[in-house]
């Protein structure tokens, strides 16, 4: 089913802002209430969104494909806005820049331990780095093992923590 232009634009907002609340969508869409947001979601976008265990609005994978928007990524007036969990935000902070030598998962793990009072597993760090890669802000450099560095200048991205 083809979506009307307004529904497509609003679905793109859901994808970009996820996970999000009715209040955030209310502000973005300029509607009167969260109830109006809920009614619109149910009437126009019911097959493209769901609520997670915290009742936050999330888009289905099909929705992201339909509107060609990266989940949790939005272009702002001063660059890209990326919404990520705490570990991804911290990994973004410790990764080398685009012109620096990339680091292995283990090196990033040690950098996280040194910079923050945290002790993630190597698998959690790998998962965080891959998620940042999917958002287009981290690149993989193939060596004996995959290594990672920022794909963009750190200053060009505003990282917002979801946690």
Image: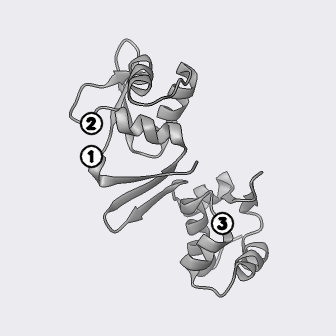
> What's the CA distance linking mark 2 and mark 3?
33 Å
Residue 101 - label: none
Kindly state the secondary structure of the residue where label 2 is placed: loop
Residue at point 71% right, 62% down? 48
Considering only order in the chain, which callout, 2 or 1, is on the residue closer to the N terminus? 2
Q: Which residue is mark 1?
A: 153
Q: Label 2: few (<14), some or many (≥20) within 10 Å? A: some
Q: Which corner quadrant of the image does residue 4 belong to? A: bottom right
Q: Label 3: few (<14), some or many (≥20) within 10 Å? A: some
Q: Which residue is mark 2?
A: 97
Q: Which residue is mark 3?
A: 21
> CB atoms at circles 1 and 2 under 8 Å apart?
yes
Q: Which corner quadrant of the image does residue 41 belong to? A: bottom right
138 vs 45: above or below = above
Considering only order in the chain, which callout, 3 or 1, is on the residue closer to the N terminus? 3
Considering only order in the chain, which callout, 3 or 2, is on the residue closer to the N terminus? 3
| Residue 115 place in picture, x, y as percent | 38, 29
70 vs 38: above or below = above
- Horizontal arrangement in the rendering, residue 141 relative to residue 120 (left or right): left
> What's the CA distance linking mark 1 and mark 3?
30 Å
Residue at point 25% right, 25% down? 101
| Residue 148 place in picture, x, y as percent | 37, 28
- Horizontal arrangement in the rendering, residue 73 relative to residue 1 (left or right): left
Residue at point 29% right, 32% down? 96
43 vs 152: above or below = below
Instruction: Mark 2 vs mark 3: give the one in front.
Output: 3
Q: Label 1: few (<14), some or many (≥20) within 10 Å? A: few
């Amino acid at each position: 089913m083809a979506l009307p232009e307004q529904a497509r634009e609003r679905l793109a907002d859901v994808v970009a802002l996820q996970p999000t609340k009715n209040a955030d969508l209310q502000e973005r869409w300029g509607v009167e209430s969260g109830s109006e947001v809920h009614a619109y979601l149910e009437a126009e976008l019911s097959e493209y969104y769901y609520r997670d265990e915290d009742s936050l609005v999330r888009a289905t994978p099909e929705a992201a494909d339909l509107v060609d928007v990266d989940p949790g990524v939005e272009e702002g007036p001063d660059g890209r806005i990326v919404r990520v969990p705490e570990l991804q935000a911290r990994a973004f902070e410790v990764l080398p820049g685009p012109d620096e030598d990339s680091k292995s998962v283990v090196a990033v793990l040690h950098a996280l331990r040194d910079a923050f009072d945290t002790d993630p597993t190597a698998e959690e760090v790998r998962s965080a780095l891959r998620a940042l890669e999917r958002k287009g802000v981290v690149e993989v450099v193939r060596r004996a093992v995959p290594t990672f560095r920022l794909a963009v200048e750190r200053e060009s991205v505003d990282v917002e923590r979801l946690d």
